[in-house]
Image: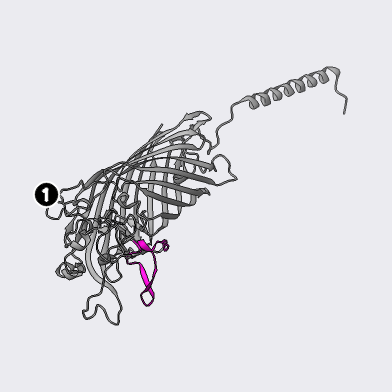
């Protein structure tokens, strides 16, 4: 092969140089060209992040986050709830098939209880900082209707509803007044301590703390069976003046929750715990006996719920700010012992039974001792203190602990960048539990013989030891085993639909 001529070599060097410069220019242009967005990258602050957006149950509105300086969610919804339970009473009647060998049967049918509640739900979530929001809720009760109906012929057996003197406590059928208004409102904080959307190595962990404040007129027991103006006796006394039926349980409360969730592709399992502790307001019938030392229970039950569920996200369309979510949840709730507005609150509290309408003494003192104004009786005996507060029966009773279990399904459709809709259904089953179960004595005080009243036991001939002090809320005609009422086969069905506007 002959060597290339000098002219040919020069031409080849020029072509190579131009090719190198063109390649370099192309690489530079490619490096500076805007990269196309990945399929799972968001293009807007509130757009669903495909395979990344946190669950609805652990979602917290934001503020001062990148190009999204402020978030505000406004919620308006409607919830319908139906509750049903069979009311039964322990039996001490000497009838064939009811009791034998000293056994107290719990098989007497009393009534079929029904309740229907329609509620308008109003709420707001306001972003304060990244994963930190203030929340506010205001449920407005449009109608709360309760009634007692015949249960397998119970209305034909009035002896099942007699007090110790044979007088009728209440009658079946029974109708409560229709109540409406605002029970409480709440304000609280939600904080996502961890957020999987920000750090893929961690699950989403939300904690929330909420204060509830009773604002409506406190509930009072009423009888609206005959139609017209409900009969609402004041404090169960013999007065004929009526009180307002009221709507509020008159409680201030603290609700706390913690929830964990972790997204895996199109599913996000979660679990959480909710706790609600309530404290009666002094304006309620609870408050009438709040300062009496003999009280065993003067607070409503403490309620704790454990939830386990999973959200399924079968559809997300990033470009249209759309996604569809299905939420499947199971929960178990423990209700501690406490005084409560039970299924028989209106029927018992509006009773005409003289035994229940008669007041209990608020305290006892030693006859003849300084400060004890009792007259008559033996000196040194523990007698009812006439200067102590009289305690009337109001229908609020001591309810024993029980467990409820339930299931929940909801569907969320985010139709666009600024709006979404939620619809759901829930079913809850309540364990059989006693709803009138107070005790005669408070055993926590055993060093005040003068205040012992009947709370003593014999220790020898004419010798007695104090076992406590009398409980002013105790009513033997409904609280003694054999006279107690129970709620059985309790079920609650909830339906709801919400609309959320997101700014």
Tell how many labels: 1
Q: What residue is at 43 percent from the left and 51 percent from the top? A: 275
The answer to whether residue 430 shows anywhere in this view is: no
- The reply, left or right, for residue 246 in relation to residue 502 is left
- Quarter of the image with the N terminus is top right
Q: Is residue 371 above or below residue 96?
A: above
- Snapshot quadrant of residue 351: bottom left
Q: Is residue 22 left or right of residue 304?
A: right
For the point 68% across and 26% down, the residue is: 27
Q: In this rendering, does residue 416 appear at all?
A: yes
Q: Quadrant of the C terminus?
A: top left
Badge 1 crowding class, 10 Å Cα cut-off, few under 14, some 14 to 19, many 20 or more, is few
Q: Look at the picture and state if 134 lies above or below 4.
A: below
Q: Residue furthest bottom?
A: 101
In the image, residue 491 lies in the stretch drawn in magenta:
no
| Frontmost residue, 283 versus 40 | 283
- Point out the stretch of residues depicted in magenta: 444-470
Q: Quick one: 438 or 255, which is closer to the camera?
A: 438
According to the image, label 1 marks what residue? Answer: 228
Expressed as whole percent of the image width and height from the top left, the position of residue 190 reads 47, 41
User: Is 460 a magenta residue?
Assistant: yes
Which of the 4 image quadrants contains residue 88? Answer: bottom left
Judge by depth and name the residue closer to the eye, 94 or 385: 385
Q: Position of residue 348 (x, y in %)?
A: 22, 59
């Amino acid at each position: 092969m002959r060597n290339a001529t000098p002219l040919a070599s020069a031409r080849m060097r020029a072509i190579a140089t131009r090719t190198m410069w063109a390649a370099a220019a192309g690489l530079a242009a490619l490096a500076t060209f805007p990269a196309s967005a990945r399929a799972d990258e968001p293009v807007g602050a509130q757009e669903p992040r495909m395979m990344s957006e946190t669950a609805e149950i652990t979602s917290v509105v934001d503020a001062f986050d990148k190009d999204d300086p402020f978030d505000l969610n406004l919620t308006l919804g409607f919830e319908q709830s139906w509750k049903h339970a069979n009311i039964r009473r322990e039996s001490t009647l000497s009838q064939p098939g009811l009791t034998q060998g000293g056994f107290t049967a719990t098989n007497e049918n009393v009534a079929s209880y029904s309740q229907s509640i329609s509620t308008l739900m109003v709420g707001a979530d306001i972003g304060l900082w990244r994963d930190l929001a203030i929340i506010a809720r205001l449920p407005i009760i449009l109608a709360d209707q309760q009634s007692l109906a015949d249960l397998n012929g119970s209305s034909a057996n009035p002896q099942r509803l007699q007090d110790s003197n044979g007088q009728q406590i209440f009658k079946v059928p029974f109708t409560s007044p229709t109540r409406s208004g605002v029970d409480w409102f709440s304000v609280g904080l939600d904080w996502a301590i961890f957020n999987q959307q920000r750090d893929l190595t961690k699950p989403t962990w939300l904690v929330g703390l909420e204060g509830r404040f009773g604002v409506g007129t406190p509930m009072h027991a009423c009888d609206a069976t005959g139609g017209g103006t409900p009969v609402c006796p004041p404090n169960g006394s013999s007065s004929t003046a009526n009180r307002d039926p009221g709507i509020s349980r008159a409680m201030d409360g603290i609700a706390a929750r913690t929830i964990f969730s972790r997204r895996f592709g199109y599913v996000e399992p979660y679990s959480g715990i909710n706790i609600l502790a309530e404290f009666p307001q002094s304006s309620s019938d609870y408050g009438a006996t709040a300062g009496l030392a003999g009280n065993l229970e003067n607070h409503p039950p403490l309620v704790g719920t454990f939830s386990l569920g999973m959200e399924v996200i079968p559809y997300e369309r990033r470009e249209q700010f759309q996604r569809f979510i299905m939420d499947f949840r199971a929960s178990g709730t423990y209700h501690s012992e406490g005084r409560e507005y039970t299924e028989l609150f209106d029927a018992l509290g509006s009773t005409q039974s003289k035994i229940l309408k008669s007041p209990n003494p608020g305290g006892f003192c030693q006859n003849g001792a300084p400060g004890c104004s009792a007259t008559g009786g033996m000196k040194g005996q523990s007698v009812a203190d006439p200067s102590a507060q009289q305690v009337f029966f109001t229908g609020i009773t001591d309810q024993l602990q029980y467990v409820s279990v339930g299931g929940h399904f909801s569907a969320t459709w985010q139709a666009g960048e600024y709006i979404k809709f939620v619809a759901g259904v829930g079913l809850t089953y309540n364990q059989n539990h006693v709803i009138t179960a107070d005790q005669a004595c408070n055993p926590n005080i055993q060093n005040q013989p003068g205040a012992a009243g009947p709370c003593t036991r014999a220790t020898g001939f004419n010798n007695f030891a104090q076992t406590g002090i009398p409980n002013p809320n105790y009513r033997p005609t409904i609280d003694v085993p054999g006279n107690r009422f129970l709620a059985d086969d309790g079920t609650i069905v909830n339906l709801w639909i919400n609309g959320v506007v997101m700014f």
